[in-house]
Amino acid sequence: MSYIPNFTPSEEPCVIPVFVEKRSRLLKNGLFFRSLSQGQQSNDLSIAVLLGGENQAGLAITQSITVKVYVNDVEMESFLAHQEKSTTVVGTENDHYNKTGFVDIRMNLNTHSSLIEMPTRSHDIEDTINVDPNDVVGFEKTPMAGAIGGPSDDSIIDSIRTGPESTLIGLKSTENDVGQNVSPSSENRIKKWSGTQWVSAQ
């Protein structure tokens, strides 16, 4: 069922409010994630990176990495990755996983997640780390932040007056693939509230 605006006819003019749209992001312990979607609702995302114990099989030592993605504190996705080092390497390098965990997390998230992604280094203008660190260091559930766009609060959405058929907003700018502000495509300049998210009005 589509969203029905809370609209009462009156002499008050109908006005389409205009917003700037951005993704949410998280940079923590050298790991950089960003939301696939743009807009305020992307700030509802949180991420946890949990490390398992080390296991040795032959000449390889592996450690499991679990990446959990939450929406409003409810777990929605979970991905398993590993970082690995060889016991044949001598010296200080033997103490590190040599970026293998970053490679495996990136491959799993970018292939399977419908909520977040982990761009390659130097791709996103807000990723301040140019090279993956040697080792993945875990962290507890941490919120993503920085997303802006159309409102997600029901009372604010209900206050928008754009007519009896649709609640509409306009976009002044959005992000391109590297995070720069650009003009939105023609089909995304006007969005309507579906009841759960802002979608193209076309």
Image (spheres, helix red, strand yellow):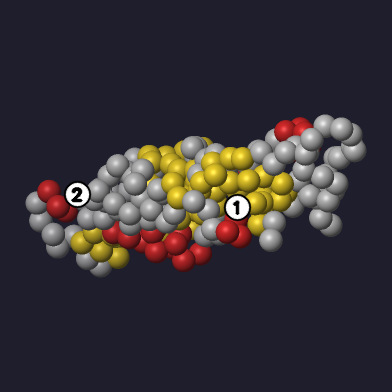
Q: Residue at x 63, y 46 (%)?
A: 170
Q: Residue placed at 54% from the left, 58% from the top?
A: 185
> Mark 1 — residue?
189
Q: Position of residue 174 (x, y in %)?
A: 50, 48
Determine which quarter of the picture holds residue 87.
Answer: bottom left
Q: How many marks?
A: 2
Helix, strand or loop at label 1? It is loop
**In the rendered view, does 47 fall on the left or right side of 160?**
left
Residue 101 position in % (x across, y down): 33, 56
Residue 110: give x, y in percent of width and height.
44, 62
Residue 80, visible in the rendered structure: no
Amino acid of disc 2: Asp
Secondary element at image label 2: helix
Precedes in sequence: disc 1 or disc 2: 2
Q: Residue 172 versus residue 36: which sits nearer the camera? A: 172
The residue pinned by badge 2 equals: 95
Q: Is residue 168 above or below residue 156?
A: below
Whole-angstrom CA distance, mark 1 to mark 2, is 51 Å
Q: Is residue 165 visible?
A: yes
Label 1 neighbour load within 10 Å: few <14, some 14-19, many 20+: some
Q: Nearer the viewer, residue 85 or 195?
A: 195
Residue 131: x and y in percent read 24, 50
Q: Is residue 104 above or below residue 13?
A: below
Q: Residue 135 or 21: which is nearer the viewer?
A: 21
